[in-house]
Amino acid sequence: MADHFDALETRSPDARRQAQAAALPKVIEAAMALPAWRQHLGTVDPAGMTSFGALARLPVLRKAHLPAMQKADAPFAGLVASDPAIFGRYFTSPGPIFEPERRGEDVWHAARAMFAAGFRTGDVVLNTFSYHLTPGGFIMDSGIRAVGGIAVPAGPGQTEQQLDVIEHLRPVAYTGTPDFLKIILDKAAELGRDVSSITKALVSGAAFPPSLRDELLRRGVAAYQAFAVADFGVIAYETPARDGLVVSEDVILEVVRVGTGDPVAIGEVGEIVITSLDPRHPVIRLALGDLTAVMDSPSPCGRTNLRIKGWMGRADQTAKIKGMFVRPEQVADIARRHPAIAKLRIVVRRDNEQDVMIVMAEAATPDDRLGATVREITKLGAAIEWHPIGALPNDGKVIADERPIG
């Protein structure tokens, strides 16, 4: 059995850099044909964009700015070509941010992550990411089919119905958040249901600490993680080496000093910036707001691309909770709907290997409607804590992510 998806994963770093640098001019040229990219990038000669150094001199575009840009210029802020021959689906993610899906095979770059996690031709895969509005389900679905697997579009929730499907179709693999995989295994143990067919998993969208990885392994499931974003797909993935995440072959990933576009030294924590190598959907130096650090050597698994340490927090106060982004502007929207609240703060913690969201509110009198507002705006349930006015920390934080890193 082959150890790697294709020869691109094991080519020399020099060959990869040369190929990526050669692809850059066409990507920049395609971007400059779109009004918003042309305005953002300024006077750039695509023919001169033949090195990573030249790329690093271009301005970054912050993902956090996309909701306002798209609201001002619907649907995609002038950053995407309006060509029905290129795109086959449109999605929306919390923010809201709207994203297109390009036509073709494995357009979300998930196949290599699937392969590294052990997915193979003929594997039946329970895909529990949502197929509703957001691209998560389709990101994994396209990767499953690209490696020759068979996707079961289960979506999230309805745990007991998921158990029925597992016992009937006997999937050998799972895709979804690590939290929901644990919920499925726990419910199966509680009800005496047989889910032993699932022995491997590719998880994303939530924290995956070693403690949860080891617990899943003890229960018979070897789970690997993928770092995916709705603007591109899978940007990095774990391999059997279990040592960092290998960057996708289809993206240039930089780690820059927070608040700038300046690349940091190897090992220094900074913000992830990505550049797509597909001229049909150019993405140039998009700053994701996620933190990581570049590792100083290739993976022991034989893949030679850049390695990162994985997700190491947020450059801003945005938090990803159970696969959904919660942003400071959403906290402000919640507070505006409840004028009696003096201060509002969302705290994210881990409990029993699951993300837990707690909404702390200062008010003279509790408002029973707050929980419904939180769910409407964030699409997530939360525990509500009421505090007397002046009790919450005066530190400027509206989202405090207290989950352990690593």
Image: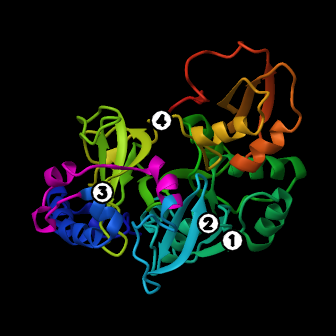
Q: Looking at the image, is mark 4 or mark 2 earlier in the sequence?
A: 2
Looking at the image, is 195 positioned above or below residue 262? below
The answer to whether the residue labelled 3 contacts the one labelled 2, judged by CB atoms less than 8 Å apart, is no
Q: Looking at the image, is mark 1 or mark 3 earlier in the sequence?
A: 3
**102 or 217, nearer to the observer:** 102
Q: Is residue 323 magenta?
A: no
Looking at the image, is 283 positioned above or below residue 356? below
Q: Looking at the image, is mark 1 or mark 4 earlier in the sequence?
A: 1
The answer to whether the residue labelled 1 contacts the one labelled 3, judged by CB atoms less than 8 Å apart, is no
Residue pointed to by mark 2: 137
Q: Residues within 10 Å of mark 4 (few under 14, many from 20)?
A: some
Determine the secondary structure under disc 3: helix
Which portion, as a residue range, is magenta? 42-71
In front: mark 2 or mark 1?
2
Residue pointed to by mark 3: 40
The answer to whether the residue labelled 2 contacts the one labelled 1, judged by CB atoms less than 8 Å apart, is yes
Real-space Cα separation, disc 2 to disc 1, in angstroms: 7 Å
Residue pointed to by mark 4: 316
- Extreme residue in the bottom direction: 85
**225 or 39, nearer to the observer:** 39
Looking at the image, is 4 positioned above or below residue 274? below
In front: mark 4 or mark 3?
3
Q: Residue at x 57, y 42 (%)?
A: 208
- Splitting the image into 4 quarters, where does residue 137 fall? bottom right
Q: Residues within 10 Å of mark 3 (few under 14, many from 20)?
A: some
Q: Residue at x 72, y 67 (%)?
A: 154
Kindly tell me whether residue 299 is visible in this rendering.
Answer: no
In front: mark 1 or mark 4?
4
